[in-house]
Amino acid sequence: MSADETERAETELRQRAKLALRNRMRAVRKALPTSACEARSAEIAKRLFALPEFERAETFLTFASIRNEVRTRPGMQAAWAAGKRVALPRVVGDELQLHLIDSETVLVEGPFSVPEPPGTATQVEPGEVDFALVPALAVDPRGYRIGYGGGYYDKLIPQLRHACTCAVAYDFQLISEVPELPFDVAVDLVVTDERLIRAE
């Protein structure tokens, strides 16, 4: 087997492993009672708000959580209360555009049933973001994550040149090692309901 064939075989194996992990984590998280989501999310919020990177950020990028994802509304409210600008992503083609929102902004349903800002909301450039929350189905201590498979955040994170990037997840979503692929991009921090990890 040539070096190219070996590399292709290894990439395929990692893709299959990621898919299996993605499906397993979806199922485990789906089984989590709402009360547990709320309690675990509150612990994550405490750790998040104590971060100096969050405290000094002027523009905060987050995502609108759905179903049993880590609740992100408390982070938005804390940011607004502290006078920060809050941005949410909007899917445009195969990329994410960032738009500012406030507590009165009415979100619209985007692709994959994820709430997002309307196209009329003020756009903000990725380079203006100081702190960014990133969703994850699974994440490892190195900051590599398994998302939903679209690759949107792997394209966005390198554009967040001045931002501290942080994956938020329940502690059971923390795994020893994500089988990363060449296009995967790690985050700087991982915050769960039990720990804070600064990526190695």
Image (cartoon, rainbow, N blue to C red):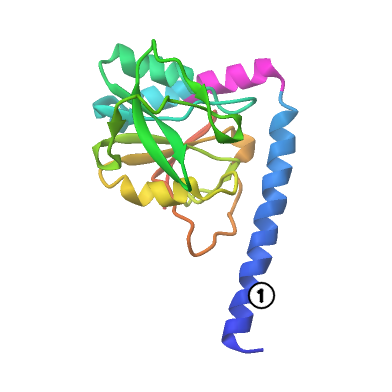
Q: Is residue 30 magenta?
A: no
For mark 1, what is the residue?
A: 9
- Is any part of residue 51 visible from this angle? no
93 relative to 61 in the view: left or right: right
Snapshot quadrant of residue 83: top left
Rendered view: 130 above or below 44: below
Rendered view: 104 above or below 192: above
**Residue extending farthest bottom:** 2
Rendered view: 102 above or below 29: above
> Is the stretch drawn in magenta largely helix, strand or loop?
helix
Q: Is residue 38 magenta?
A: yes
Q: Tell me the residue at 35%/51% (across/down).
A: 158
Q: Tell me the residue at 35%/29% (across/down).
A: 99
**Residue extending farthest front:** 120
Q: Tell me the residue at 42%/41% (across/down).
A: 96
Using a 10 Å C-alpha cutoff, classify the residue at mark 1 as few (fewer than 14 neighbours), some (14 to 19) or many (20 or more): few
- Is any part of residue 68 visible from this angle? yes
Rendered view: 166 above or below 68: below
Nearer-the-camera pick, 63 or 100: 100
Tell me where the magenta segment starts and ends, as one range: 33-44
Tell me where residue 70 appears, x and y as whole percent: 55, 27
Judged from the image, the secondary structure of the residue bearing numbered disc 1 is: helix
Tell me where residue 192 appears, x and y as whole percent: 52, 33
- Mark 1 residue type: Ala
Tell me where residue 39 appears, x and y as whole percent: 59, 17
Snapshot quadrant of residue 1: bottom right
Tell me where residue 172 appears, x and y as whole percent: 64, 37
